Amino acid sequence: MEHLTRPWRLYGELAGRATRRELAGFDLTLLAALALAWHAPDLTAPWLGALKLRPEAASGGVLLAALGFVLLFGTAPCVAVHARRLHDAGHSAWWLLFPITAPLLLLPGTRGANRYGADPRGRERLSAPSEESAPAPLRAAC
């Protein structure tokens, strides 16, 4: 569940790295929010009718308000998580200015730390244990 909430918590953090799973989770939640906003006029039609408003006339305003809300609060985390994903692949976030960067987002991340930070998957922990971290009897046998 961390991969779904982390991009929203780090909405303005451009430094660091993000996994492909984190990017996919964010993109799916943003698409779900946009789909819900797109259907907001249909969902609010009964209440607009109860308020004696014409649903046909008010549906455009409801649509603009719902889409504007999602875009207002979704743009900063979107840019941040995409920048961190490019950092994980070893590329600068300036590549976001070009519309052909989608394949770069799908590249696997670099193993271990790179110039943008530590590996978000924790691959350093999975390497062979060092002599200092070995139990005492094994240290004596070395």
Image: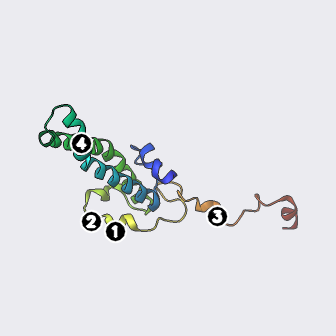
Could you tell me which residue is drawn at 43 percent across and 62 percent down?
90
Secondary structure of the residue carrying numbered label 1: helix
Sooner in the amino-acid sequence: mark 1 or mark 3: 1
The answer to whether 131 appears left or right of 119 in the picture is: right
- Amino acid type indicated by mark 3: Leu
Location of residue 15 in the rendering, given as x and y in whole percent from the top left corner = 43, 49
Distance CA(mark 4)–CA(mark 2): 26 Å
Figure coloring: rainbow
Q: Which residue is mark 4?
A: 68
Sooner in the amino-acid sequence: mark 4 or mark 1: 4
Please tell me whether mark 2 sits on a helix, a strand or a loop. Answer: loop
Which numbered marker is on residue 59?
none
From the viewer's perspective, is 139 left or right of 16? Answer: right
- Gap between marks 1 and 2, in whole Å? 7 Å
Residue 36 in view here: yes
Instruction: Classify mark 1: residues with Cα within 10 Å, few (<14), some (14-19) or many (20+).
Output: few
Q: Which residue is mark 1?
A: 103
